[in-house]
């Protein structure tokens, strides 16, 4: 049975699991530990080591994929929205490979989630443009055209009143401001309507921490584009990272 390991580094938690590549499901429990305060490189690396130890795969030879909340080009992280600024322009892939003593696949976290949903979830066999959005600490996005990833889109950083719209619209904003589902959905409506106008997608897929409550907000949105919850919910990043690692 073909397997790979996926690690999903987020602004608040670092998650990992062993993925069944044929079915796009977890063959293990999903392990989660809090992201270290400040999310500096050395501390994040140490926490990833801890997660792999807890999962029992610290010495495994299975392919390993790491999903990360930043623009990733040729192994270098070019942004840092909910993590330390140390990551900007940082050779992150080499840093993790040296620190873990093994080859890895390194990818943007929302892109990993999008790949999981395109191969094994809500966007499987979808034609045209699928836009995956992850609603959590921030807003991540992934564009997939006929299942092919167009990497490093950053819809969460569309501007609203001079700052990134994710500050106003992410799931964390709902929790921080204690918004009702109705009030928060009104913010989502503004976000998705704007994205719909800009890109004319064929499908929206919603993942991230809030995707376990789709009945609370999806029916409140009025869009021309179908919008559905991610099948793999908050495990999409793990599954996508592992899937991409197995491609290499």
Image (tube, rainbow, N blue to C red):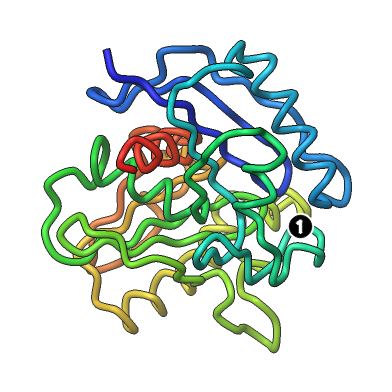
Q: Position of residue 95 (x, y in %)?
A: 69, 50
- Identify which residue is drawn at 32% across, 67% down: 150
Image quadrant where one finds the C terminus: top left
**Residue 117 falls left or right of residue 78:** left
Name the residue nearer the viewer: 202 or 53.
Answer: 53
For disc 1, the marked residue is 83
Q: Position of residue 179 (x, y in %)?
A: 69, 54
- Identify which residue is drawn at 56% across, 66% down: 71
Image quadrant where one finds the N terminus: top left
Name the residue nearer the viewer: 60 or 108.
Answer: 60
Q: Position of residue 136 (x, y in %)?
A: 60, 49
Classify 7 as above or below 138.
above
Q: Residues within 10 Å of mark 1 (few under 14, many from 20)?
A: many
Q: Position of residue 191 (x, y in %)?
A: 48, 72
Classify 68 as above or below 235.
below
- In the orientation shown, which residue stands out farthest toward the bottom? 162
- In the orientation shown, which residue stands out farthest toward the right? 37
């Amino acid at each position: 049975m073909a397997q790979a390991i996926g690690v999903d580094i987020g602004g608040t938690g670092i998650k990992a699991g062993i993925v069944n590549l044929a079915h796009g499901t977890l063959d293990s429990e999903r392990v989660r530990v809090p992201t270290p305060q400040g999310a500096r490189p050395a501390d994040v690396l140490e926490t990833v080591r801890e997660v792999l130890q807890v999962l029992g795969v610290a010495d495994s030879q299975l392919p390993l994929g790491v999903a990360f909340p930043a623009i990733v080009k040729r192994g270098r992280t070019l942004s840092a929205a909910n993590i330390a600024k140390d990551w900007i322009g940082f050779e992150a892939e080499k840093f993790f490979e040296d620190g873990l003593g093994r080859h890895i696949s390194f990818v943007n976290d929302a892109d990993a989630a999008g790949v999981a949903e395109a191969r094994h979830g809500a966007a499987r066999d979808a034609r045209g443009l699928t836009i995956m959005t992850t609603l959590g600490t921030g807003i991540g996005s992934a564009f997939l055209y006929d299942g092919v990833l167009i990497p490093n889109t950053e819809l969460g950083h569309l501007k609203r009143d001079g700052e990134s719209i994710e500050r106003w619209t992410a799931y964390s904003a709902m929790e921080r401001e204690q918004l009702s589902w109705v009030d928060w959905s009104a913010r989502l409506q503004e976000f998705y309507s704007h994205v719909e106008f800009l890109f004319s997608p064929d499908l929206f897929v919603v993942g991230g921490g809030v995707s376990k409550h789709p009945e609370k907000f999806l029916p409140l949105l009025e869009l021309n584009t179908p919008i559905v919850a991610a099948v793999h919910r908050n495990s999409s990043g793990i599954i996508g990272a592992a899937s991409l690692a197995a491609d290499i």
